[in-house]
Image: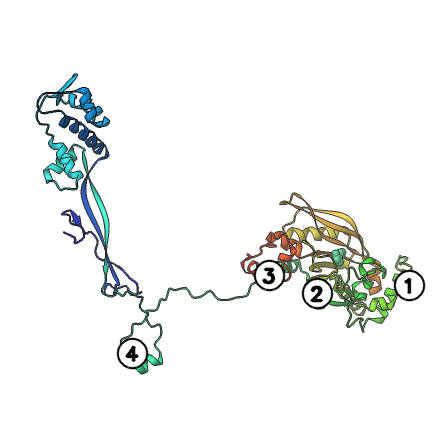
Amino acid sequence: MKSPILASSLLIVDSITTTLLMSSKASTASATLTLRILRKKHWCLLKRVKNMLKKDRLKFNFFLAVPQEGSISKEELQKLLDPAVYKIGCSQAAKNKWVQMGNQISRKVQHVEDRVKDLLLQIQDGQELGKDDNNSLKARKLTALQTWKGYSVKRGPEYAPRRRRTATDLTREHLQGGDWRNIEFKEYNFSAKGPPPESGHLHPLNKVKERIKNIFRLMNFEEMPTNRYVESSFWNFDALFQPQQHPARDSHDTFFLKAPATTKQLPEDYVETVKRVHESGGYGSRGYGYEWKREEANKNLLRTHTTAISSRMLYALAQHAKQQSFTPKKYFSIDRVFRNEAVDRTHLAEFHQIEGLVCDRGLTLGHLIGVLQDFFSRLGMDKLKFKPAYNPYTEPSMEIFSYHEGLKKWVEIGNSGMFRPEMLRPMGFSEDVNVIAWGLSLERPTMILYGINNIRDLFGHKVDLGLIKKNPLCLIGIK
Ligand code: PHE
């Protein structure tokens, strides 16, 4: 079959018309372009043969330079010819017995004819040979059949130089104007993806918080209501047997409120007992021996720890025990606390505190260590170490360290202790009731889990919203 663009008898069109479609309709009738794949088979010389022909031509040119009659001197011939022609000719023309070599060079034959070479040259020029010639050249491994591939691109029946707009909806105007008859409608694409739905994203702190809440729930802890950022100094400090001259209370570490500057309501009986225990002790304690001031306890502040909530909850529990009977409790909370600290890579003036406590009869330091080991191993921290520490409201007190496999060192992860009798007894608990408790920040494990180095990238106005959208699920605490 002959193609208009390829004048060759060997042209084969081996594809059915392929259509390039610009509209979504998959019928040939609506094709804007028609594409045909064309194949042409032709004979070509093998590489080795091409080189051979080149040499042969040099040899032939050498022969032509030798005069038909008489002879020519070597030097003269050398001057006449290209060095390559001369060099090849000297060796090859003599070998073929075309010329007589010596100081004088003369022809031995009048014509050199090589039919095979002529055929090969014809192929090189792109000419067609007869079937027999082609077969014999192929059999002598001089030529090979090659396939040429090409395309013919033509305008299709639906050809339009500019993209045509198809209607996506049938409108009132189409109906009223009657153009619905001629209009081309776009087909529905039922497998097209819709736009991704907009949705909210949980902040990494919220994800880790939820996981830790689940760990507490699995350990049968109840959540304490922490919905009060403003607290009185009484519940934040005094109830925790923290002396009124304690450096943490001064304005460097605590944000005191201007309005309302003081609290209106405190349980008066309990306030009296707290005052007494601060001033002169009781329950085996000597107290601090200073004059306790109510004005100091009344001052409102932003809570510096959620232990303020623990003291409220324990007081309520002790009241309940007095009226009815004592019920052991396991409590936890995760919420914001505020400290007037210099802001740097790892500190902000606020953070989230995780707090857990167990209130029961006959608890010991061994129970505390056991509960801590259980809790932290569920967070993926199996290796723990404890260091004696000081808190005004716990005795003994322990700092908790965990071995960080990534950093290859022990990292401080929390603070803990057994609440002092000076805190528990004024609330109304009997002597045999103990409370073991611990606290840690939510930011620290979150930064470690999400590989965040600067706390300002995690919390506050500089946080990149992209970080919140992209961050993966948090998968701790699945034990
Ligand atoms: N309130 C302590 C803090 O702010 C944490 C803590 C809670 C320590 C309970 C001991 C017991 O770090």
Please tell me which residue lies in front, 383 or 325: 383
Q: Residues within 10 Å of mark 2 (few under 14, many from 20)?
A: some
171 vs 32: above or below: below
> CA–CA distance between discs 3 and 1?
47 Å
Q: Earlier in the sequence, mark 4 or mark 3?
A: 4
Q: Are marks 4 and 1 in contact (CB under 8 Å)?
A: no
| Amino acid type at image mark 3 | His
Picture coordinates of residue 400, whole percent (x, y): 72, 50
> CA–CA distance between discs 4 and 2?
69 Å
> CA–CA distance between discs 4 and 1?
95 Å
| Amino acid type at image mark 1 | Glu
Residue at image mark 1: 291
| Amino acid type at image mark 2 | Met
Residue at image mark 2: 224
14 vs 275: above or below: above
Q: Are marks 4 and 2 in contact (CB under 8 Å)?
A: no
Residue at image mark 3: 203
Looking at the image, is mark 4 or mark 2 nearer the viewer?
A: 4
- Quarter for ligand 1? bottom right
Tag 2's secondary structure? loop
Q: Earlier in the sequence, mark 4 or mark 2?
A: 4
| Amino acid type at image mark 4 | Asp
* Residue lying furthest bottom: 176
Picture coordinates of residue 241, whole percent (x, y): 83, 60
Q: Earlier in the sequence, mark 2 or mark 3?
A: 3
Please tell me which residue lies in front, 112 or 447: 112
**Residue 215 lies in what quarter of the image?**
bottom right
> CA–CA distance between discs 1 and 2?
33 Å
Tag 4's secondary structure? helix
Q: Are marks 4 and 3 in contact (CB under 8 Å)?
A: no
Q: Is mark 1 within 8 Å of ligand 1?
A: no
